[in-house]
């Protein structure tokens, strides 16, 4: 029963893929994929979550803390939330397809 609870927690670690021009270039060159992750997630949790959800072998995880931008709306000043992204490197021959192409 604790295995199911652990898997449920791992399923919530990844918020979603971070698709951008840079992440596309990195994915083609060095098999790194970029994910937006929870701010309290660590490298071990991210690695286990990717391996569980996509059935791939992860060799390395790099984490980047992204500071939220300051935004104005008229006279009031606000700030977007800080967030975290992870660069996940896959083993040789492994791949993740976000677009669903066969």
Image (cartoon, grey):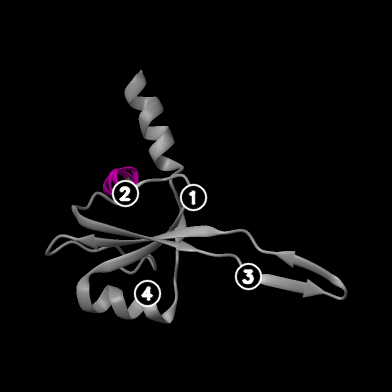
Residue at position x 41%, y 41% in the image: 11
Q: Nearer the viewer, mark 4 or mark 3?
A: 3
Q: Secondary structure at mark 3?
A: loop
Q: Earlier in the sequence, mark 3 or mark 1?
A: 1
Residue at position x 55%, y 65% in the image: 67
Apparent side of residue 80 relative to residue 29 in the rendered image (left or right):
right
Residue 29 pos. (x, y %):
22, 79
Residue at position x 45%, y 66% in the image: 18
Question: Magenta segment range?
Answer: 44-52
Q: Earlier in the sequence, mark 4 or mark 1?
A: 4
Identify the residue at the far left of this view.
Answer: 92
Q: Secondary structure at mark 1?
A: loop
Apparent side of residue 13 relative to residue 62 in the rendered image (left or right):
right
Q: Earlier in the sequence, mark 2 or mark 3?
A: 2
Quarter where residue 68 is shown: bottom right
**Front-most of residues 68 and 19:** 68
Q: CA distance from mark 2 to mark 3?
A: 25 Å
Q: Nearer the viewer, mark 4 or mark 2?
A: 2
Residue annotated with mark 1: 39
Callout 4: 10 Å neighbours few (<14), some, many (20+)? Answer: some
Identify the residue at the far top of this view.
Answer: 1
Residue annotated with mark 2: 43
Residue annotated with mark 3: 69
Q: CA distance from mark 4 to mark 3?
A: 20 Å
Residue annotated with mark 4: 23
């Amino acid at each position: 029963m604790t295995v199911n609870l652990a898997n449920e927690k791992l399923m919530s670690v990844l918020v979603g893929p971070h698709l951008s021009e840079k992440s596309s270039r990195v994915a083609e060159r060095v098999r790194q994929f970029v994910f937006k992750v929870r701010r309290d997630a660590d490298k071990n949790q991210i690695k286990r979550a990717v391996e569980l959800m996509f059935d791939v072998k992860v060799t390395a995880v790099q984490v980047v803390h992204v500071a939220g931008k300051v935004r104005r709306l008229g006279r009031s000043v606000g700030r977007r939330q800080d967030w975290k992204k992870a660069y996940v490197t896959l083993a040789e021959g492994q791949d993740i397809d976000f677009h669903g192409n066969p």
